[in-house]
Amino acid sequence: MSPEEPRILEKRYAVTEQEAIQFMGGEVPHVLSTPSLVNWMELTCREALMPLLAPGEDSVGVSVQVKHLAATPVGMKVKVISRLTRVEGRVFTFEIEAYDDLERIGEATHQRASVLVSKFAGRVAAKKEKAGGGSRT
């Protein structure tokens, strides 16, 4: 990637009950949860990165620093804009902004690492086997 070719992607998402917090009770309108906002940010960055990866590669999130700046009620739309700002070997750094219909609601710095899918799958399978093949509580 050269500085003259910034990798920018803009995606839009709808806030539904599935992405909302619901723990404040019925008197508070349900709003977009921070984990859902982070998920949308990661998905947008991953999609922006895919065309730069070799066949058989994908990416995994390795770091995220996020500020959730404002509440967004269910029913509103969210625009997430990711900008690839740095490439260091297998690590890709993104700056992200998120807006609802009225205001800026979030910002983040996110890093993703490219992985060879077959190698990654093998490492995860070996870890699962070492742990006894099942989940531990």
Image: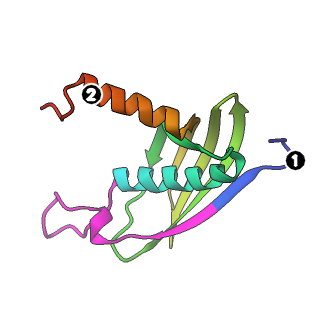
Numbered disc 1: secondary structure? loop
Asked if residue 61 is positioned above or below residue 46 in the image, the reply reads above
Q: Quick one: 116 or 47, which is closer to the camera? A: 116
**x then y, percent, for residue 21:** 25, 59
Magenta stretch encompasses residue 48: no
Q: Say which residue appears at 20% left-offset and 67% top-offset.
A: 28
User: Is 2 displayed left or right of 40 in the figure?
Assistant: right
Q: Nearer the viewer, mark 2 or mark 1?
A: 2
Numbered disc 2: secondary structure? helix
Mark 2 touching mark 1, by CB under 8 A? no
The residue that label 2 is drawn on is: 129
Q: Quadrant of the N terminus?
A: top right
Magenta stretch encompasses residue 21: yes
Q: Which mark is residue 4?
A: 1
Q: Quick one: 47 or 30, which is closer to the camera? A: 47
- Farthest bottom residue? 75
**x then y, percent, for residue 57:** 60, 42
Q: Say which residue appears at 46% left-offset and 57% top-offset.
A: 40
- Of the residues under marks 2 and 1, which one precedes in the sequence? 1
Amino acid on which disc 1 is placed = Glu
